[in-house]
Image (cartoon, grey):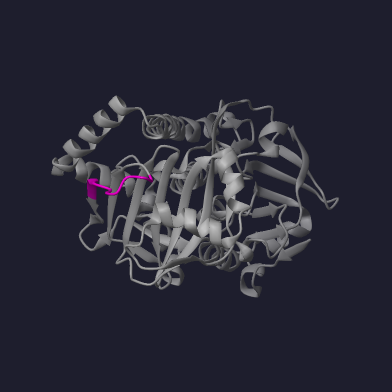
Amino acid sequence: MSRTTPNASASKEPGSAAQAHSADRFDVLIAGAGYVGLALAVSIADARPGMRVMIVDAAPEDAWQRDGRASAIAAAASRMLTRLGCWEEIAGRAQPIVDMVITDSRTSDPVRPVFLTFGGEAAPGEPFAHMVMNRDLNAALRRRAGELGVDIVQGVAVDGFEVEGATVSVSLSDGMQARTRLLVAADGVRSRLRDMAGIKTLHWDYGQSGIVCTVAHERPHNGRAEEHFLPAGPFATLPLMGNRSSIVWTERTEDAERLVNEDDFIFEQELELRFGLKLGEIHVDGPRRAWPLGLTLARDFVKPRFALAGDAAHGIHPIAGQGLNLGFKDAAALAEVVVEADRLGEDIGAIDVLQRYERWRRFDTVQMGVTTDLLNRLFSNDFGPLRAMRDIGLGLVDRMPGMKSFFVRQAAGMDRSAPRLLQGETI
């Protein structure tokens, strides 16, 4: 177990996390130090410095530093990170996505016709997304959390909790007992806290796994992202800094497990069949891993003094690359609800307050879950008539500038109903 202690200046302020830790009483206790938990803590502490916020995370101290994956950060999320004082630290290592092409073919097809292209600007001079290494994102959020006096405890899990009147009594695996007005589960799609709270989920397995790795190539990608719809599932190529790209490769689970266990030569041969040689010779740069894919939607997002956020509330297919950005929307929405309730003197853990967050986020997450499910079912097959219909549809969208602009803004998270932080505003 290790603790990230707030800096000295923060710990001297009344109501700081350091003082709160000694009393074991908090306003908000968050389980999970991924990007959702960190962004939520930073958002609350930045807008409401007097609130006491703590994060506990079961992973070892250096686990996040070993994460070699990258994520697509939508324009709205980068606005949020700018407002929170994190983006400047990230921007120099973030790769803008300047355009995107979509193809639909088999691996054996000699030609991969492009059916749909997107320009990469959500607004003039603002790319609709950036590719960011997960460890860079995590480092920036952790640095800001420390500045704001948020206490981060690593290697400690929540063993149990019980609502007792106006607080929640939380038992931690290191023997510590904490009390908090609000407990938030941001502990991933297999959330233990969600199960402890008795919240049921809607879930089905796609029989697919996502292979994730980084590829180095001879020629520059020029900021272009590509998504090839193949019979087994989408194969996405996402640009990273330098002559490198992040690969999100969907295969049937049994094939994915076989591929990640192959030697480098066989794996790279299979990869080359899908990646092609447009960027010259390629080789895998770093480890490769596979994750099972499915759709998971929580039936409830909140209980009295308890809320779900991020993958604990919803796990979706990566076909649209929106999982991380849905998590940022949760963090921004829950922070806004909590901060505004506290300003009004309301009980931040009361069910009527938390239901504002649930109403705000439920439709969007269900809509995105259903959309990604339909897209995966539509494109992850080799049925001839359906293939012809979807290719015609992609071609029609490509010839409709207004429709393409709408899709770009949606991918960028530019929604007027979005939380203030995602619009670049303060809470």
Image quadrant of residue 92?
Answer: bottom left
Residue 181 lies within the magenta run: no
Residue 356 at what x, y percent from top left? 48, 32
Residue 353 at what x, y percent from top left? 53, 33
- The residue drawn where x is 44% and y is 30% is 366
Residue 115 lies within the magenta run: yes
Quarter the N terminus occupies: bottom right
Q: Which one is in front, 4 or 45?
A: 4
Q: Is residue 348 above or below residue 328?
A: above
- Number of numbered labels in the structure image: 0
Residue 374 at what x, y percent from top left? 39, 29
- The residue drawn where x is 43% and y is 71% is 93
Q: Which one is in front, 233 or 274?
A: 274
Residue 358 visible in image: yes
Residue 309 visible in image: no
Residue 235 at what x, y percent from top left? 41, 48
Q: Which one is in front, 199 or 304?
A: 199
Q: Is residue 253 above or below residue 422?
A: above
Image quadrant of residue 404?
Answer: top left
Relative to 39, is 123 on the left or the right?
A: left
- The residue drawn where x is 59% and y is 39% is 254
The magenta stretch is 107-117
User: Magenta part mainly helix, strand or loop?
Assistant: loop
Q: Is residue 283 above or below residue 344?
A: below
Q: Which one is in front, 149 or 224?
A: 224
